Image (tube, rainbow, N blue to C red):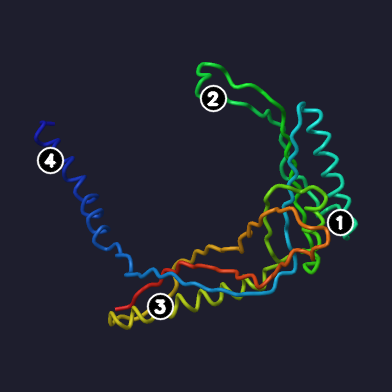
């Protein structure tokens, strides 16, 4: 068979496949117009649990002496927590470190290396307190017993699922209302939901300062307030013509 005849035959065989491919490309449906909106919802409830961080820091000439001092102070703090009714499962060591304390050369001692002058031990205890009314008393007692590092308080809820559900419902309603307003302003209809994603925001810890208090002073004043649980949703809707 001549080369020209072979080329013509191959072209004839390829033509139906190309025509089918072109027809399929023309028939493929275009994605429907869509709109993405963000909705927010919030629900507030009273906290039923407080989480405290109580830190002990001790310094001494040797690591052994610093460790012994920190251990003694933390043992008293832990015993006091248990005396207040805090269960073992609600007490957890969240940080522990031993580090040297350095004296750095002054301006007239350039070129000399820092010298170790002692050692520092830090021990931090996380306490879940399920009786919020005791928070002020517990903080005051902890400082009296040797807690001397700043920490934090977070008032939380053992089971915030009901509040989060309420916040999600509000967020979806908010997103739907926004989408309807935008669609009406554009003169188009609002179709079905294509996609939903969410992000939840929990209450944050509030820092507090550890200060030496008079033994006769009243307990630390603490207000629990309310916990606001927030949910943001991104919702994608189809748009009608």
Q: Are marks 4 and 3 in contact (CB under 8 Å)?
A: no
- Nearer the observer, disc 1 or disc 3? 1
Q: Which residue is mark 4?
A: 8
Q: CA distance from mark 2 to mark 4?
A: 93 Å
Q: Which residue is mark 3?
A: 178
Q: Which residue is mark 2?
A: 106
Question: For mark 4, does the 10 Å Cα neighbourhood hold few (<14), some (14 to 19), or many (20 or more) residues?
Answer: few
Q: Which residue is mark 1?
A: 87
Q: Position of residue 200 (x, y in %)?
A: 56, 63
Q: CA distance from mark 3 to mark 2?
A: 64 Å
Q: Position of residue 27 (x, y in %)?
A: 27, 63
Q: Earlier in the sequence, mark 3 or mark 2?
A: 2
Point out the residue furthest to the front here: 108
Local secondary structure at mark 3: helix
Asked whether 107 or 147 is in front, the reply is 107
Q: Earlier in the sequence, mark 2 or mark 4?
A: 4
Q: Earlier in the sequence, mark 4 or mark 1?
A: 4
Seen at 71% across and 53% down, the residue is 211
Q: Earlier in the sequence, mark 1 or mark 3?
A: 1
Q: CA distance from mark 1 to mark 2?
A: 50 Å
- Nearer the observer, disc 3 or disc 2? 2
Q: Quadrant of the N terminus?
A: top left
Give residue 46's quadrant in the image.
bottom right
Q: Quadrant of the C terminus?
A: bottom left
- Nearer the observer, disc 1 or disc 2? 2
Question: For mark 2, does the 10 Å Cα neighbourhood hold few (<14), some (14 to 19), or many (20 or more) residues?
Answer: few
Q: Earlier in the sequence, mark 4 or mark 3?
A: 4
- Nearer the observer, disc 4 or disc 3? 3
Seen at 86% across and 56% down, the residue is 87
Q: Is residue 104 left or right of residue 20?
A: right
Local secondary structure at mark 4: helix
Q: Are marks 3 and 2 in contact (CB under 8 Å)?
A: no
């Amino acid at each position: 068979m001549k080369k020209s005849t072979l080329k013509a035959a191959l072209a004839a065989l390829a033509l139906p496949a190309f025509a089918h491919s072109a027809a399929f490309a023309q028939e493929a449906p275009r994605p429907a117009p869509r709109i993405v909106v963000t909705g927010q919802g919030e629900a507030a409830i009273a906290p039923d649990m407080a989480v405290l961080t109580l830190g002990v820091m001790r310094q001494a000439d040797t690591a052994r002496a610093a460790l012994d001092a920190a251990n003694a102070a933390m043992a008293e703090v832990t015993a006091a927590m248990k005396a207040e009714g805090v269960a073992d499962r609600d007490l957890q060591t969240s940080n522990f470190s031993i580090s040297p304390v350095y004296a750095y050369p002054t301006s007239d001692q350039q070129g000399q290396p820092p010298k170790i002058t002692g050692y520092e031990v830090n021990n931090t205890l996380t306490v879940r307190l399920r009786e919020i009314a005791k928070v002020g008393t517990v903080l005051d007692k902890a400082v009296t017993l040797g807690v001397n590092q700043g920490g934090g308080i977070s008032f939380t809820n053992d089971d915030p699922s009901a509040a989060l559900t309420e916040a999600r419902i509000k967020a979806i309603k908010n997103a739907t209302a926004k989408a309807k307003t935008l669609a009406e302003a554009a003169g188009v209809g609002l179709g079905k939901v294509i996609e939903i994603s969410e992000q939840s925001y929990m209450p944050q810890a509030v820092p507090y300062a550890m200060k030496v208090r008079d033994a006769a002073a009243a307990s630390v004043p603490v207000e629990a307030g309310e916990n606001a649980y927030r949910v943001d949703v991104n919702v994608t809707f189809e748009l009608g013509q």
